[in-house]
Image (cartoon, rainbow, N blue to C red):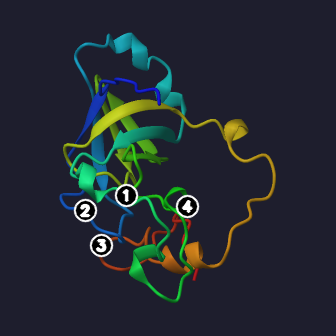
Amino acid sequence: MATYEVESIATVVGGHTRVQDDYQGGIESVIRLNDAYPLETLLGIEEFSHLTVTWRFHMAQPEDVQLHARSPRGNPRWPATGTFVHRNHRRPNQLATSYPRLLKVEGRDLLVTDLDAVDGTPIIDLAPYFKEMGPRSEVRQPTWPGEMLSTYWLDASGRPRPDSPVTS
């Protein structure tokens, strides 16, 4: 099996202070580019509304990995599914991809909202989101992800945001 060494390019500053399963919406945080990268590496990024951010579950431990089928969030109403059907820290490389909205760029700081990573999270990669690189056909999925994530993008008050993908 091949292994790869990667270094973080940025760090999340502020925003969520603890790991939680829901109520991820409406929180602003900063993605702060490491000093090793010249400012011109961000040139033009402010033209985009959203980013594609790859990050590491840095608070997870190697022993958190679970290589077996299990019900999402331990809920027996949802079917047991394999490790690579879940989107959490229990996968082997403990990586995540998020699509936060870019609000403002100030030097090395990218102010974003709806980034579901916590303060101190190392960012492995970032790029603008190109809608042309998203799914090219209708997205199909079973019903349980919609049930499981029905409160994911609610804000801390439990209310959906007007621009939230959550539907009642």
Q: Residues within 10 Å of mark 4 (few under 14, many from 20)?
A: few
Query: Mark 1 highlights which residue?
Result: 90
Write the residue at 44% across / 84% down. Answer: 75
Q: Position of residue 105 (x, y in %)?
A: 36, 31
Q: Nearer the viewer, residue 12 or 30?
A: 12
Q: Position of residue 107 (x, y in %)?
A: 29, 22
Q: The disc labelled 3 sits on which kind of residue?
A: Ala
Residue 161 lies in quadrant: bottom left
Viewed as shown, does residue 89 lie left or right of 63? right
Mark nearer the viewer, 3 or 4: 4
Q: Earlier in the sequence, mark 1 or mark 4?
A: 4
Q: Earlier in the sequence, mark 3 or mark 1?
A: 1
Q: Secondary structure at mark 1?
A: loop
Q: CA distance from mark 2 to mark 1?
A: 14 Å
Q: CA distance from mark 3 to mark 1?
A: 25 Å
Query: Mark 3 highlights which residue?
Result: 156
Q: Is residue 72 above or below residue 124?
A: below
Query: Mark 2 highlights which residue?
Result: 19
Q: Secondary structure at mark 3?
A: loop
Q: Residues within 10 Å of mark 1 (few under 14, many from 20)?
A: many
Q: The disc labelled 2 sits on which kind of residue?
A: Val
Q: Earlier in the sequence, mark 3 or mark 4?
A: 4
Mark nearer the viewer, 2 or 1: 1
